[in-house]
Image: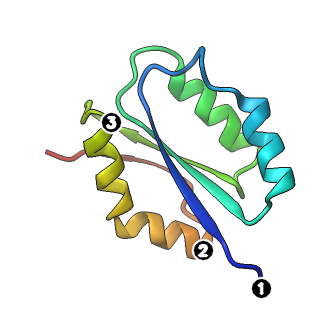
Amino acid sequence: MESLAIIVIPCYNEATRLQVSTFKAFTCTWPAVRFLFVDDASTDRTRQVLEGLHQDDPQHFAICHCDFNHKVAQTAMIWLNASTAMIWLKTCKRVAFSISMS
């Protein structure tokens, strides 16, 4: 089995900046890479854009929606340390979920 890599990408109000076609092309070139997008309680259409990306290719794109904004650095650290991301990486079964942390 080929080694897998996961890239965690915190997002906040990125609907107009997310380059969906670039991410899709990346996974065609490097199929062992998985993306975990963490929507940090965006108030624009970021959630819908990410859900569309996940629906198109759930094997490569996972999303997590935070109930409130943690700011980028804290969001990245939460998910770099989270066992949920590791479970997803190993099984690729749990790919769309929401969290609420204080």
Q: Are marks 2 and 1 in contact (CB under 8 Å)?
A: no
CA distance for labels 3 and 2: 26 Å
CA distance for labels 2 and 1: 13 Å
Q: Secondary structure at mark 1?
A: loop
The part of the image, by quadrant, that contains residue 7 is bottom right
Q: Is residue 99 left or right of residue 88?
A: left
Q: Is residue 94 left or right of residue 83?
A: right
Q: Which residue is mark 3?
A: 72
The part of the image, by quadrant, that contains residue 73 is top left
- What's the residue at 54%, 62% (across, down)? 94
Percent position of residue 19, x then y: 69, 27
- Label 2 crowd (10 A; few <14 / some 14-19 / many >=20): few
Q: Which residue is mark 2?
A: 91
Percent position of residue 90, x then y: 58, 76
Q: Is residue 89 above or below residue 3?
A: above
| Picture disc at residue 95 | none
| Picture disc at residue 1 | 1
What colour-coding does the image apply?
Answer: rainbow
Q: Earlier in the sequence, mark 3 or mark 2?
A: 3
| Amino acid type shown at disc 3 | Val
CA distance for labels 1 and 3: 33 Å
| Amino acid type shown at disc 1 | Met
Percent position of residue 89, x then y: 56, 69
- What's the residue at 69%, 78% (across, down)? 3
Percent position of residue 38, x then y: 44, 42
Q: Is residue 13 above or below residue 71?
A: above
- What's the residue at 62%, 66% (across, down)? 5
Question: Foreground residue, 10 or 56?
Answer: 10
Q: Secondary structure at mark 2?
A: helix
| Amino acid type shown at disc 2 | Thr
| Pair 2/1: label in front | 1
